[in-house]
Amino acid sequence: MIHGYKLNGFNIIVDAASGSVHSVDDVAYDAILMYESAGEAAALSLICEKYDDVSFEDASKLTSDIKGLAERGKLFSADAFESLEEKARDAPLKALCLNVSHMCNMSCSYCFADKGAYKGDKKLMPLETGVRAIDFLVANSGSRRNLYVDFFGGEPLMNFDVVKHIVAYARGIESECGKRFLFTLTTNGLLIDEDVIDFSNREMDNVVLSLDGRPEINDAVRRLPGGAGSYSAVVPKFKEFIEKRDGEKYYIRGTFTRNNLDFFEDIKHIADLGFTELSMEPAVSVPGDAHSLSDEHLPEIFRQYELLASEMIKRRKEGGGFTFYHFMLDLTAGPCLYKRLAGCGVGTEYLAVTPDGGLFPCHRFIGDDKFLMGDVFGGVTNTKLRDKFKGSTMHSRSECRECWARMFCSGGCAANAYGASGDISGIYKLGCELFKKRIECAIMINVAEYGGLT
């Protein structure tokens, strides 16, 4: 299977199974598409009929080259990776999302986590639970050396002393257990102070800072409990934080909704503030919600992604570029094969921990007791659910088998699939369309930076 598309003046062919990308002229583009659907003779005939300035000899050489690429597995290649999924499914635990706080000091109108409480009681994680979570991670990590822990919420800085003590405990056992911990802090920024900055820049491998863009956009949804906007309270803190972090290992993470479909302007605004590591996520909410996205919004969202991709190319040429998380794509290496097949590892390699120690497949499933897998004290007891997640891979979805982007997507987000279809092995169709468009843009950026035709 191949996928052909035209974007920003480039004709691009993607070979689905091999991941090969070809940037070609108009003649080759038409020939490759015809070759897949009707064969070599039909491709040769099309070129001779459509392009008067292409000789029969040149057209024959072109179709011969296409045949050669196919023989080398660079075009029309077969998917030979399904047999490897079993190994991907059995990978040991590598990451925990520690919900150290089910409380929040903001009241964001689109919050999937029920203002931080996850449809339950407001509570903070005790240190003992956090320490046990670290022990649980180590005990179930097999031969992995690098282990990942994300401090999440609610607002994790509302439980900052416990965060510091959990980190200290983990650092204290690194040598004896032969592990290396990499920590991430995700925060709305209101409680950032010198202590937070100094500690994070010393201990956090990454920080994620929430900002939705222009003041009027951010303040319409990211509000303080009294109703005031948060922009002016957090932006100066973010600037100081990142400056003292030497501009590295962070993300400014935003969310766009149906109410700011011109989110390209919000990304530009954040970049113009001096931030260079950016993310802007589509809101995922119940259909009909005031913030929900639907199919009718896709054309405009696609246009915004295209504008963003062009702007990124422009700024990089001018020496003032920035990174956009969803356009990050390494065509020369990229994720390992098993990650391509099994995705983020939800419910297997990656688990979320509630303040009382409950284990869930990821933070998006917290609050739904059907997805309680056990706890950090007794381990995973709902092995049937764990096996369900193990079996939910790229090849387990019929829709994915027929999708050109499957080796980039790995089957998509299980939480979004469940929300849209009622099954973690289903699909979130709107999310699929957004992902494919982002990958098209990301590939185009790579092609532009490699110089176009290859």
Image (spheres, helix red, strand yellow):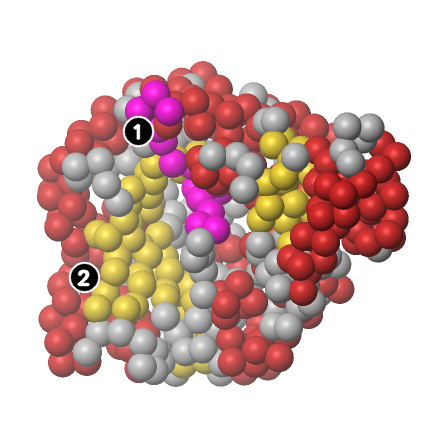
Q: Quadrant of the N terminus?
A: bottom right
Residue 122 in the image: above or below residue 302: below
Q: Position of residue 389 (x, y in %)?
A: 58, 72
Q: Is residue 445 visible?
A: no
- Label 2 or label 1, whichever lies nearer to me, is 1
Q: Secondary structure at mark 2?
A: helix
Residue located at (75% from left, 64% from top): 398
89 horizontally vs 117: left or right? right
Q: Position of residue 250 (x, y in %)?
A: 29, 42
Q: Is residue 46 visible?
A: yes
In the image, is residue 328 part of the stretch drawn in magenta? yes
Residue 412 in the image: above or below residue 225: below
Q: Nearer the viewer, residue 4 or 217?
A: 4
Residue 194 in the image: above or below residue 412: above
- Which residue position holds label 1? 275
Give neighbour class at mark 1: few <14, some 14-19, many 20+ (Cα, 10 Å): many
Q: Nearer the viewer, residue 259 or 271?
A: 271
* Mark 1 residue type: Phe
Q: Quadrant of residue 121?
A: bottom left
| Segment tinted magenta in the rendering | 317-331
- Which residue position holds label 2? 167
Q: Secondary structure at mark 1?
A: loop
Distance from disc 2 to disc 1, alpha carbons, whole Å, reads 27 Å
